[in-house]
Image (spheres, grey):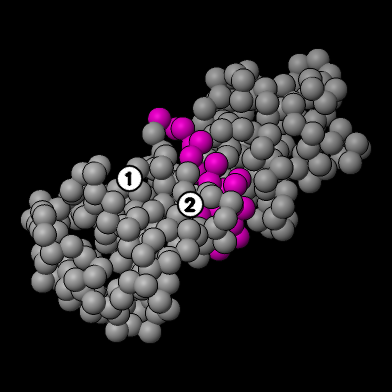
Amino acid sequence: MLDYTQFQAAFPTDGLPPYETADLREIETFRKAFNGVLFIDRVLKALGIGEGRVYPPKGANGLRTLHHQVCESKATSFHKLSVLFYLLLDIDDVRGGQSHLADALAEESGLPQTYQILMRGLWHLDRKQFKFAVEHLAHPSLPPSEFADDIIVVLVRHAVANDYSLPLAYYHTTRPLIKRPETLDLLFGALARTSVTEALYFLRSYPEYVRQQLFEMLVASVLDHAEGAGPRGKELVSLPLSCPEEKWLHDYLTAGEGKKSKNAKPIVQMRQIVTGRSRGSVAIPGHSYADAAKVRC
């Protein structure tokens, strides 16, 4: 069994030196892209390793110091090995495709596959390799991640050209418990811009006071992008709304913030037609629409 507490056993002493100036500069560029916090920073903090910012280590001596801090911490052996595994992924990346130091450490130390998959996923995330990150972090063998909120936030904020397939794939696969309002807003915004119908069913899992806020976010998303009777507008007016949702829609479009949108009136009119409430020409706000909603509900 590998004695990872010995620096020479865990890290190579030959070949390209680790964490040279160019490597450090690249890592700091990634950190700035994530508002100053990498996922390895979160891991080290959660494990109580070092004080302040200890990653990336500066050169070989810095790596020795970080290795000592890892080994002297109160973290479990598997958690310590996970950090070393991440550091070796850095070195493998610098040395090229023929280097497999991280895999060798995992095999010789008996680091379970779940730890390897998680740390490799976080490493890809820290390198902005989002597709590879999701492939690992959404792996069915992984338990719910304590970093799920942060993962969703990063994936949504770095989505390209309004393509939210990666954050939504991560969410639908792992089904994490959303803990922060910011995360919920970002995730729901991604859902609303991707599928109006899916967003509706998502918001129904929340208490009513949250559900109304999310519903109005959904309608606002449609108003911002709909061109009158556009596809998203048609999808919205065709939804099977509950009585409270029907009222929220009417109030938001006729008296709330949605009234300011040029698309509010076309959507109200389309909804009246779809629900059979239209009676000739329709004004906004219109008593016939509100009264019909009350009668039906």
Depth check, front residue: 68 or 58: 68
Relative to 43, residue 278 above or below: above
Which type of secondary structure does the marked residue at label 2 adopt? helix
Q: Residues within 10 Å of mark 1 (few under 14, many from 20)?
A: some
Q: Report whether residue 44 is seen.
A: no
> Residue 184: percent from the left, percent from the top?
55, 53
Q: From the viewer's perspective, is 150 left or right of 8?
A: right
> Residue 179: percent from the left, percent from the top?
55, 63
Relative to 97, residue 80 above or below: below
Q: Nearer the viewer, mark 2 or mark 1?
A: 2
Q: From the viewer's perspective, is 89 left or right of 76?
A: left
The span shown in magenta is 161-185
Dividing the picture into quarters, in which one does residue 103 lie? bottom left
Q: From the viewer's perspective, is 122 left or right of 143?
A: left
Q: Amino acid at mark 2?
A: Leu
User: Residue tagged by mark 2?
Assistant: 137
The dominant secondary structure in magenta is: helix
Membership of 48 in magenta stretch? no
Residue name at image x 51 percent, y 36 percent: 165
Dividing the picture into quarters, in which one does residue 272 lie? top right
Which image quarter is the C terminus in? top right
Q: Which mark is residue 128?
A: 1
Q: CA distance from mark 2 to mark 1?
A: 14 Å
Which type of secondary structure does the marked residue at label 1 adopt? loop
Membership of 167 in magenta stretch? yes
Residue name at image x 42 percent, y 72 percent: 78
N-terminal of the two: label 2 or label 1?
1
Depth check, front residue: 128 or 227: 128
Q: Which mark is residue 38?
A: none
Q: Amino acid at mark 1?
A: Lys
